[in-house]
Image (cartoon, rainbow, N blue to C red):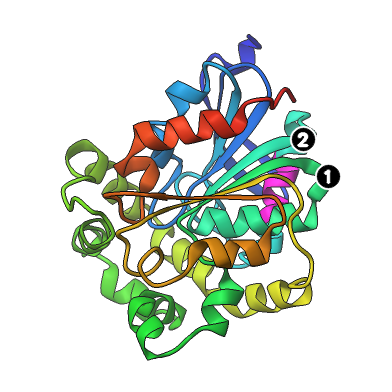
Amino acid sequence: MDTKRLNINHTLYANGIRQNYIDTGEGAPVVLLHGFPETNYAWRYQIPVLSKKYRIIAPDLRGYGETDKPATGYDKRNMANDIIALLDELGIDKIALVGHDRGARVATRLAKDHPERVDRLVVMDNVPTRIVARDLNAEVAKAYWFFLFHLVPDLPEVLISGKEEQWLRWFFSDWTYDPSTISGEAFHTYVQAYRSPGAVRGAMADYRANAIDLEQDKEDAHIKIECPTLALWGENFGAVGKMFDMPKIWAEMATNLKAVSIEQCGHLPHEERPDKVNALLLEFLQGWKG
């Protein structure tokens, strides 16, 4: 193994920001993009398994974790370019790409803007931005209240400051089938991450790029993702599996689609049902040689 990767945590400058990322394992490269309200720590159950067969790159997205949190640049096209720039610095051309939640939005945009760089795509528990906006009604707005709340300038940061533990506890309890899934060391790790300077603002900035994201998505809505695509979701999450026809939605997005619902699971399949998710990922990644 490259001695530069013996320590799996690294930082480098790419696309104008300092990016923190995990780099471990050998073989064909697989990139893991976390969602909200997480960091790359979210992949702690996948990395030890997948890195036995693949080289795993798991960055903290712009605005999250130990990656820089600039004031601008959170539209998904630019966040996808963050990942492309990171890969270019690492000398990696083509990847298998896995994204959850916000990371799935970045991954979807990357697959559309840079199809030559993505061999296969996994999107986890995500309804595309364009679909959420298109289908918005009172029921959807209630389920996606945090989308709207996070759009308000400055107010979320003021209300969350000093209350990071309570804020995160609500999400992790409400968004999981078993409310105790994220507890102990895992919960403490996330709380500490969001107590860091700029962390809440960075996450809010991700959501506040929604209007730009929507316009980007509308521009190429007619273009489908052609690489093999696996859509996974928890069947018990009210804002995704219970509210939307996920196979139908992702059939609008991708031509070569496999759609799988995970039972007894909420919004965080990779943390709630890691053995199931790992098995599905390993099956889907078969044949990826880089």
- Direction from residue 45 to residue 8 in the image, left or right: right
Residue for point 27% across, 75% down: 159
The front one of 137 and 67 is 137
Q: Is residue 153 left or right of residue 238?
A: right
The amino acid sitting under disc 2 is: Lys
The residue that label 2 is drawn on is 94
What amino acid type should be assigned to the residue bearing mark 1? Glu
Q: Identify the magenta region.
A: 80-86
Q: How far apart are the two marked residues, 1 and 2, measured between alpha carbons?
A: 7 Å
Tell me the SS state at disc 2: loop
Q: Is residue 51 above or below residue 173?
A: above
What is the quadrant of the C terminus in the image? top right
Tell me whether circle 1 and circle 2 mark residues in contact (CB < 8 Å).
yes
Q: Residue furthest bottom?
A: 138
Q: Nearer the viewer, residue 162 or 164?
A: 164
Residue 9 location (% of width, % of height): 51, 28
- Front residue of this view, candidates 173 and 134: 134
Query: Which residue lies at the image location 54% right of the left edge and 36% below the top edge?
Result: 58
Per the image, is 279 magenta? Answer: no
Residue 10 visible, this orientation: no
Residue occupied by mark 1: 116
Outermost residue, right side: 116
| Quarter where residue 87 is shown | top right
Tell me which corner region of the image, top left, top right, bottom left or bottom right, holds residue 204: bottom left
Relative to 198, residue 227 above or below? above
